[in-house]
Image (tube, grey):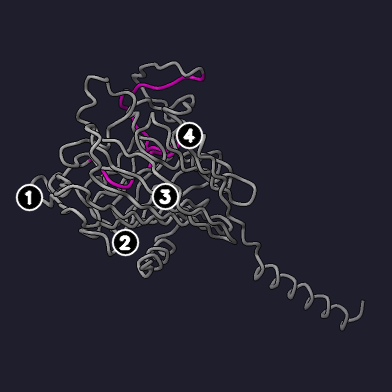
């Protein structure tokens, strides 16, 4: 090969490499709506990323399960599909959800089929109403749903309109959620409470290692009390935008929170990002080592040990808007990368 041919070949390889990097295939996002089965599957390419489900047993619509690019499930299976070695506490912690522990005195957060019938008078339920939009596209898809926050007396306290925009790149999945809550009665009071607001319950592998006793499931779904936890493969840790780590993040304020760990050798980051238009920004975090991860701007009295309170209220016809970004990345994202995502989200107004 002569010199001219050699350098021509190198130039061609460079052009091909540049072309491939600039034309990275953007995945198609689509929706499979099945109102009979009470679910909407969210597909990225041919694979399910998550599903919007609303079976009556869990008393609220949720996104469940949530699957990474590498095919690992980041959400807990219990109580819908228990997996061996999982905790079986808090049966109301299912997938990704939004609700609250005290709305006009009713507990929406803790409601589930596990509540005895005779005690259900104190619990509220969020009933799915309609799928307004399920529109896919290249790298982006939009799902719009409506629901009613209903007291056990069948009085609708709040109507909900939620827009979820799903986006995808090579190793990152993003859910941007905007929820509009409109009061349907004279006054809707969100009394300060730690149980809220936007949350995910993660898989066992993403919990923080613990030596405390717990009730776990075995491979057959049998519940066993475990005095000494097996922390093999348990790799989770929290890290906030303010540099707070581990269990200490509970009750702290931050514009974003990362939960990172490894499942089946896949590095994973689950990042929740607050929006500056949300009330009482930056939010407090109701994030626990056992896998509950939640942003709660409404629980000020709890998180300040009573030094301050909010007790947010809506009058009939008024609307509160909450916006959050949830990132599921197949990588241990750096602070710089997350700050870029947070800045981008902060500049999004619609």
Instruction: Give the residue pinned by disc 3.
Output: 145
Instruction: Tell which residue pokes out farthest to the left in this image.
Output: 307
Q: Nearer the viewer, mark 2 or mark 4?
A: 2
Q: Nearer the viewer, mark 1 or mark 2?
A: 2
Spatial CA span between label 1 and label 2: 24 Å
Say few, some or many: other residues with alpha carbon within 10 Å of mark 4 (under 14 / 14 to 19 / 20 or more).
some
2 and 3 marks in contact (CB < 8 Å): no
* 146, above or below 90, in the image: below
Residue 208 horizontal side relative to residue 106, left or right: right
Magenta span of residues:
195-219
Q: Residue at x 22, y 35 (%)?
A: 107
Q: Quadrant of the C terminus?
A: bottom left
Q: Earlier in the sequence, mark 3 or mark 1?
A: 3
Q: Earlier in the sequence, mark 3 or mark 4?
A: 3
Instruction: Give the residue pinned by disc 1.
Output: 307
SS label for mark 1: loop
Instruction: Give the residue pinned by disc 2.
Output: 275
Spatial CA span between label 4 and label 1: 40 Å
Q: Nearer the viewer, mark 3 or mark 4?
A: 3
Instruction: Give the residue pinned by disc 4.
Output: 233
Instruction: Tell which residue pokes out farthest to the bottom in this image.
Output: 4
Q: Position of residue 347 (x, y in %)?
A: 37, 70
Q: Position of residue 143 (x, y in %)?
A: 47, 53
Q: Earlier in the sequence, mark 4 or mark 1?
A: 4
* 141, above or below 349, in the image: above
Q: Position of residue 300 (x, y in %)?
A: 15, 50
Spatial CA span between label 2 and label 3: 21 Å
Q: Is residue 196 magenta?
A: yes
Q: Nearer the viewer, mark 4 or mark 1?
A: 1
Spatial CA span between label 3 and label 4: 37 Å
């Amino acid at each position: 090969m002569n010199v001219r041919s050699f350098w021509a070949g190198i130039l061609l390889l460079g052009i091909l490499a540049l072309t491939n990097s600039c034309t990275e295939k953007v995945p198609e996002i689509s929706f499979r709506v099945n109102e009979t089965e009470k679910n909407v599957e969210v597909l990225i390419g041919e694979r399910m990323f998550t599903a919007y489900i609303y079976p009556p047993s869990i008393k609220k619509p949720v996104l469940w399960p949530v699957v990474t690019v590498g095919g690992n499930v980041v959400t807990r299976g219990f109580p819908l599909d228990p997996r061996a070695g999982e905790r079986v506490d808090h049966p109301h912690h299912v997938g990704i959800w939004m609700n609250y522990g005290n709305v006009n005195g009713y507990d929406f957060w803790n409601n589930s089929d596990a509540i005895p019938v005779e005690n259900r008078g104190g619990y509220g339920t969020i009933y799915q109403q309609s799928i307004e939009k399920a529109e896919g596209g290249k790298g982006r898809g939009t799902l719009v749903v409506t629901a009613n926050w209903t007291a056990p007396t069948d009085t609708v306290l709040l109507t909900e309109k939620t827009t979820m925009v799903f986006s995808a790149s090579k190793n990152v999945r993003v859910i941007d959620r905007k929820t509009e809550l409109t009061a349907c009665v004279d006054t809707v009071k969100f009394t300060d409470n730690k149980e809220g607001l936007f949350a995910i319950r993660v898989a066992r592998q993403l919990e923080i290692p613990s030596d405390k006793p717990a009730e776990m499931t075995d491979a057959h779904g049998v519940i066993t009390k475990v005095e000494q936890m097996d922390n093999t493969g348990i790799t989770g840790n929290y890290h906030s935008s303010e540099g707070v780590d581990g269990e200490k993040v509970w009750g702290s304020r931050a514009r974003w929170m990362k939960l990172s760990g490894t499942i089946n050798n896949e590095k994973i980051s689950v990042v929740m990002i607050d929006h500056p238009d949300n009330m009482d920004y930056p939010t407090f975090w109701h994030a626990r080592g056992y896998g509950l991860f939640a942003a709660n701007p409404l629980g000020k009295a709890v998180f300040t040990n009573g030094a301050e309170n909010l007790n947010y209220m809506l009058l009939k016809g008024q609307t509160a808007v909450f916006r959050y970004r949830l990132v599921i990345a197949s990588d241990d994202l750096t602070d710089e990368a997350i700050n870029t995502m947070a800045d981008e989200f902060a500049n999004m107004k619609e």
